[in-house]
Amino acid sequence: MSAVKVYIPGDSSAVAVGANKVAQAIERLAREKGREIQIVRNGSRGLYWLEPMVEVATPNGRIAYGPVAPGDLAGLFDADFLSGGAHGLCLGKPEEIPFLKQQERLMFARCGIIDPLSIEEYRANNGYRGLAKALQMQPAEIVAEVTESGLRGRGGAGFPTGIKWNTVLKAEADRKYIVCNADEGDSGTFADRMIMEGDPFLLIEGMTIAGIATGATKGFIYIRSEYPDAFRQMGRAIEIARNSGYLGPNVLGSGKSFDLETRLGAGAYICGEETSLLESLEGKRGVIRPKPPLPALKGLFGKPTVINNVLSFTSVPVIIDDGAAFYKNYGMGRSRGTQPFQLAGNIRQGGLVEKAFGVTLKELVYDFGGGTLSGRPVRAVQVGGPLGAYLRGDQLDIPMDYEAFAAVKAMLGHGGLVVFDDTVDMAQQARFAMEFCAAESCGKCTPCRIGSTRGVEVIDRIIAGTQREKNLRLLDDLCETMVDGSLCALGGLTPFPVQSAIRHFPEDFDKPSRKAAE
């Protein structure tokens, strides 16, 4: 009898809730019972409320069980879970779980399914087909395909990826660079980490295609310091790809050169901004560079540089493999393709949902997320990280689309959703936005550095009921100055959560109303 494959996520979120202990206990019990098993530490499928989710390969497909604790394992072995036996924790075939079945996974098609560090499994599951095709194309053809697909930057700004790549392609220089912004610092986001831990070759493939397309020969992945597992995983994957001929001076025998390195950040939120990231990569303090010049013309070490987010690069292989028309078939308006939406905060079913643009916020929060974990009504949802606007519980019919969000003075950002129930104090949330900006500002420009500090003070006076109307006007004027005068999006977008909180929840800023509510 051959060994039974047992899949236990090595994803850091799964590990945080006991996946390593479960793996050790399964290995020990199998040995005691004389059962031959092969444990595979896969990535997570993104159903985090069910982690650790253990899957067993059976003749009828993989069967999932979860959430599994070490104390559940004796009963699982008694139920013969290694053969897919019935048990109270049995979830059936993972692909049939409604949370997964209703998704449209392009980027996350392999995540949670394969061994993340097996390049053979990656190739067997459609991996490296995009690169193989790209190597048969002219650089301009690759860029044209990406442009035609409608892919926009997934890091927050939504800038058309093809335009950026074309600028670097046409730039004259003795060296060009590809830089991946994996400094995923927004609240409620974890998609970048999931990819780097669960399907790292996808990011490597996407960046390699970018290098071939633009004439860049060197790439860097800038990973936030809070992601040590992702940092180690990417380092191992790069070494494997290099040893297998997918990186180096002669990529797949094509005569074209491209290589990658990882760099670990130092905990600065501001280094999620592209020019601060470049300063940090060059060994300097992470502060904003004024633009122009644009990084596409004068970026890392003064050379033309493509800077994209993890999700932008990981969208590219499927575009090149299946074609721009295939990719454009997903989405709505100018928002094409799919987006991994991350559900967090006070939500019953936290996790990752990859859907085509156009799905509504309501569908994500209720159909996928199951509403609040507390069971209380949804009062607010913040989309786009700590600088994203707050939307009311009755505004959730809005489609997830760049232009639809801009129309209500909000932004999609990196696709993170943080849900709040009716116990949240929105005045305190507004104060936190200014406090966060003050703590994370690089200090380069006055509107951000000083404006955020004064913002905390003004909101404190409003909360205390001191000259409320006068201070609300002052706060509005301060927000306008920050939007118009800040050098980057940290100061420029901090007013979004502040003003949206005041606009949608004015009662929380009125001292008599606050006392009545208490």
Image: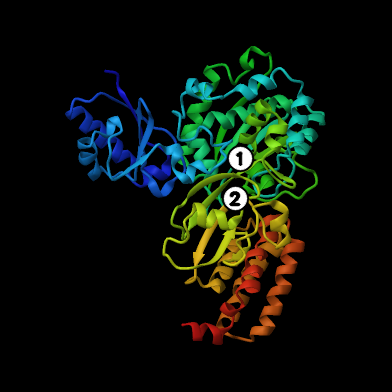
Please say if 303 is above or below 36.
Answer: below
Q: Hey, which residue is sitting farthest left in the picture?
A: 32
- Dot 1: few (<14), some (14–19), or many (≥20) neighbours within 10 Å? many
Q: Which mark is residue 215?
A: none
Classify residue 84 by image quadrant.
Answer: top left
Of residues 196 and 76, the one nearer the viewer is 76
Q: Can the viewer see residue 44 in this picture? A: no
| Residue located 60% across and 80% down the image | 462
Q: Is residue 464 left or right of residue 57?
A: right
Q: Position of residue 16 (x, y in %)?
A: 37, 46
Q: Which mark is residue 311?
A: 1
Query: Marks 1/2: CA distance?
Result: 10 Å
Q: Is residue 324 left or right of residue 185?
A: right
| Residue located 63% across and 30% down the image | 318
Q: Which mark is residue 415?
A: 2
Tell me which label, 1 or 2, sits earlier in the chain. Answer: 1
| Coloration of the structure image | rainbow
| Residue located 80% across and 44% down the image | 293
